[in-house]
Amino acid sequence: MSTHYDVIVIGLGAMGSTAAYQLAKRGQRVLGLEQFGPAHDQGSSHGGSRIIRQSYFEDPAYVPLLLRAYELWDEIKRESGEEIMTVTGGLMMGPPDSLTVSGSIKSSKQWDLAYEVLEATDIRGRFPVFNPSPNTIALYEEKAGFVRPERSVYTHLLHAEKHGADLRFFESVQSWEAHPSGEGVRVVTNNGTYEAGKVVISAGAWAPQILKDLGVNLQVERHIQMFFEPTRGIEPFRVGNQPIYIWEADDNVQLYGFPSVGIGAEGAKVAFFRKGKPCTPETIDRNVHSDEVDMMREYLAQGIPQLNGRFLQGKTCMYTNTPDEHFVISAHPNHPQVAVAAGFSGHGFKFASVVGEILADLVIDGKTNHPIDLFSPQRFAYQ
Ligand SMILES: Cc1cc2nc3c(=O)[nH]c(=O)nc-3n(C[C@H](O)[C@H](O)[C@H](O)COP(=O)(O)OP(=O)(O)OC[C@H]3O[C@@H](n4cnc5c(N)ncnc54)[C@H](O)[C@@H]3O)c2cc1C
């Protein structure tokens, strides 16, 4: 007799780990399946840090979810004792009419979030490592900071197990089948066949393969996280002295970075937000090339000269983009017993805590009170 599960979670990364945790905590019998080990570096959830912020330039509709995400990051900290989120303050910099600045101000105003607007001279005065051009301004948000992706995944998995989840690693899902009645699923792996009432599919960059009939054109992109050694010591780049930042240059390229979080041999991490190359998890080039480092250096030389020191390491990572760069979080359009979390388009991690709660709502109640209309796959149905 095989164990009977209420729900199977396919993919235990950012979203699958929080879903397994929330579901197990609410008493569901959970089977979690992951093709790699816990908190691995082959997908989208590694590299030590991910920005979290509330003044969301992408769309004000994300703000209520962010407020709940912050509460849940605090909750897992209370339950585990692990510091996953660190608040450092954040600068959203660019020309006044840039999306980074104007979109952040719009979200803050709409949701009455506290913020300051800093002129270029104020930015330089308060955070001397930055060298903004005279037409650059910034929204400064006190509540912004970063979350630690590996620690989040690992901690949620550990606590999912504590609440009774059965998690299997190095087990790869080959296919899944939803019963046409709307009840029941069968999942086939390299190791066996499992049945359950419901399934959560949170497969990250593998979603295009495992969710072929979702009706969303998901494109995977290769991105690079780069660590540089500051030229005048790490002190100005430590938490406490340095906020997280997103910087839209005059050519609209968005650069973002973090204080030193103690990995990368004391370097600080910096990356481009949207300058990835199309790839698949099978074809991704994991090497970082000197022309890619040189391109980053051009921006650092101008904007953060003190960070333009020795290149310490580069780590590739994948985005899974939807056509409008908004997420997909929904019941599967053809199968009510299948909950999907996909297409996080390079900005999903900060939401992982609340996405787990939403997925648990969808599985257990068939609906959620969180505002997720923006994330329906049906928005692409008539395009
Ligand atoms: C360079 C980079 C920087 C980023 N910066 C930020 C940031 O600053 N702030 C922010 O909020 N977000 C950021 N993101 C985005 C964020 O990290 C992602 O949106 C998020 O990690 C996606 O989580 P996921 O659960 O969808 O994917 P993953 O965490 O990759 O999880 C998917 C899991 O499914 C498993 N899987 C897939 N197929 C199968 C199968 N068939 N069988 C078994 N297991 C399977 C995979 O092995 C993987 O573990 C960044 C991403 C990158 C790459």
Image (cartoon, rainbow, N blue to C red):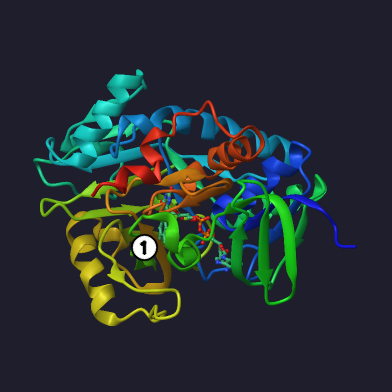
Q: 142 left or right of 10?
A: left
Lateral position of residue 259 relative to residue 300, left or right: right
Along the horizontal axis of the image, is 231 left or right of 103?
Answer: right
Q: Vertical placement of 355 versus 177: above or below?
A: above
Quadrant for residue 343, please give it. Answer: bottom left
The residue beneath circle 1 is: 230
The image shows residue 148 at horizontal and vertical percentages of 55, 52
Q: Quadrant of the N terminus?
A: bottom right
Is the distance from the Cβ of mark 1 to the nearest ligand 1 atom less than 8 Å? no
Secondary structure at badge 1 equals loop
* Residue 212 seen from this side: yes
Q: Position of residue 126 (x, y in %)?
A: 30, 37
Name the residue nearer the viewer: 234 or 187. 187
The residue drawn where x is 45% and y is 74% is 281
- Classed neighbour count for the residue bearing mark 1: other residues with Cα under 10 Å, few (<14), some (14–19), many (≥20): many
Q: Position of residue 351 (x, y in %)?
A: 49, 42
**Residue type at numbered disc 1:** Pro
Which residue occupies 70% across, 68% down?
169
Q: Nearer the viewer, residue 225 or 323?
A: 323
Residue 280 percent across, percent down from the top left: 40, 74
Q: Is residue 81 visible?
A: no
Is 39 in front, or is 382? 382
For this orientation, the residue located farthest to the top is 112
| Above or below, comparing residue 39 to residue 56 in the picture | below
Seen in the image, is 102 located left or right of residue 236? left
Please tell me which residue is depicted at 44% across the width and 48% down the height of the picture: 348
